[in-house]
Amino acid sequence: MFSVDVLPNDRFLLCSDGLHGLVPESELAQLIAFPELVEAASRLVDRANAAGGKDNITAIVVEVEEV
């Protein structure tokens, strides 16, 4: 366990191993930044599937509203 300082509008990706490693970090930042959180998660899953997703793929994108 660890803690990090967060600011409003910071986003975090919670994902299963089915997504981890399939989407390059350079693309992760672009996909997570999509304005709608649900759409961002959906695009991440789609991208992982396109990269050969051989396992269950779960993605949750959360955004900090207030600190």
Image: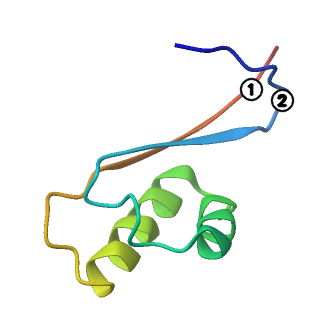
Taking the image as shown, residue 5 lies to the left or right of residue 1, namely: right
Taking the image as shown, residue 22 lies to the left or right of residue 53, namely: right
Label 1 and label 2: CA atoms lie apart by 5 Å
Q: Which class describes the residues within 10 Å of circle 1: few (<14), some (14-19), or many (20+)? A: few
Residue drawn at x 14%, y 63% is 55
Q: Which residue is mark 1?
A: 65
Give percent across and percent down for residue 18.
25, 59
Q: Residue furthest left?
A: 55
Q: Amino acid at mark 1?
A: Glu
Residue drawn at x 23%, y 83% is 52
Answer with the quarter of the image where residue 67 lies.
top right
Q: Which mark is residue 8?
A: 2
Taking the image as shown, residue 43 lies to the left or right of residue 46, namely: right
Answer with the quarter of the image where residue 28 lies.
bottom right
Colouring of the image: rainbow
Q: Amino acid at mark 2?
A: Pro
Q: State how many labels appear.
A: 2
Q: Confirm or deny contact between disc 1 and disc 2 (CB under 8 A).
A: yes
**Secondary structure type for disc 1:** loop
**Secondary structure type for disc 2:** loop
Give percent across and percent down for residue 43.
44, 71
Labels 1 and 2: the sequence-earlier one: 2
Reply above or below: 15 against 63: below
Q: Which mark is residue 10?
A: none
Residue drawn at x 22%, y 74% is 53
Tell which of 22 and 37 is nearer to you: 22
